[in-house]
Image (cartoon, rainbow, N blue to C red):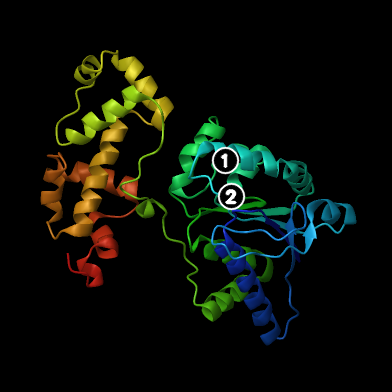
Amino acid sequence: MKAAILLMDNCFGTGINGILDALIAANYSLIKSGAQPLFEWELVSLDGNSVQPTNGLRIDADCDLASFVARGDKPDIWIIPGIYQSASNFGKVQAAMQKSEVMVPVLQQHMAEDKMIVCMCTGAFLLAQANLLGKNPALMHWRNEHHFRQAFPTLTIDSQNTIAEYHNLLCSIGGSMAYEYLVLRLIGRFAGHQTAINTAKLLMMDLNAPPAAPYRATHFKPEHQDALVQQAQLYLQRNSSEELNMVGLAEELNISDRQLKRRFAAALACSPLQYLQQVRVNQACNLLEATQLPSSKIVLEVGYKDESSFRRLFKKQMAMTMETYRQQFGIMAHGISA
């Protein structure tokens, strides 16, 4: 079972090294069980030179892409790690997409032969370039979602799940440990569940991927250039405990409520009400992290009178209850003093 792993400058080095470590451990587990090692791999960069990941630790390539393709030794799996930074600015995203475009026909041919592609985080940009996602949502780190929507406005994003499998596409979000769930799923698919378990135990990995939603930063603000929407955001943040009056807000901004909703959708991919709900949930998260206020009081603090309604909203957005969130992220849960 041969894997080709794409290397590019500014790729996620930890993910590449972690995947290799897990494949080595899987082969070791197979040998110890009396079987033959299953996985082999080749590191492929666009020009054959070493690349510098975001952590600065260079990774040597085994081969350049053109030679690898010309050789005709087709891999069973293409692994696309987080291949470039996209959180910094959209210009860098566009430049990286242009550079990686040479991979598009390679991946399209690979999928046409019903072979597997494994993709992590910003590798989803390359899948979208190649039109390989179809109607399936893309998975990626939450900081990259805004730029993905800019580049591919007709495609959707799954912000809830850590990992997803679409026939021969195996995708995961980003982050330091997301590659673990991805590579263990890959090992389980081709070498069996027991080998995945053995690998997880050997490397002390977790087989069960947590939901992605709780890890979204509560202070993160997507970039956009619509000054009017920015004004509306500031107003909603400052008056988050008050009931939303769409007509009044639109009048204050000298715009119709329909136009305001349209501008919000274009800038933030949500409605003003959905944005206000996000603000309130974020405020609740901050209070759960930093205080010991009872959940019922936190609900009132963020502007809700109906506790059960807010609890449903919180669980929908964060994929866990308020109490579970506090256990996972609260200062007292980890022995940290305020």
Q: Quadrant of the N terminus?
A: bottom right
Q: What's under tag 1, amino acid-wise?
A: Val
Element at badge 1?
Answer: helix
The answer to whether residue 133 of the structure is visible from this angle is no
Q: Are marks 2 and 1 in contact (CB under 8 Å)?
A: yes
For the point 54% across and 62% down, the residue is: 55
Q: Which mark is residue 182?
A: none
Q: What's under tag 2, amino acid-wise?
A: Tyr
* Disc 2 residue crowd, few under 14, some 14–19, many 20+, Cα 10 Å: many
Q: Is residue 2 above or below residue 279?
A: below
Percent position of residue 2, x then y: 76, 64
**Residue at the spot of label 2:** 84
**Residue at the spot of label 1:** 93
For the point 69% across and 42% down, the residue is: 99
Count of numbered badges drawn on the protein: 2
Distance (Cα) linking label 2 and label 1: 8 Å
For the point 39% across and 20% down, the residue is: 262
- Say left or right for 303 vs 228: left
* Disc 1 residue crowd, few under 14, some 14–19, many 20+, Cα 10 Å: many
Q: Is residue 27 above or below residue 276?
A: below
Percent position of residue 250, x then y: 25, 17
Percent position of residue 5, x then y: 70, 59
For the point 74% across and 77% down, the residue is: 37
- Say left or right for 134 vs 173: right
Percent position of residue 169, x then y: 64, 50
Of labels 2 and 1, earlier in sequence is: 2
Residue situated in front as seen by the camera: 186 or 105 = 105
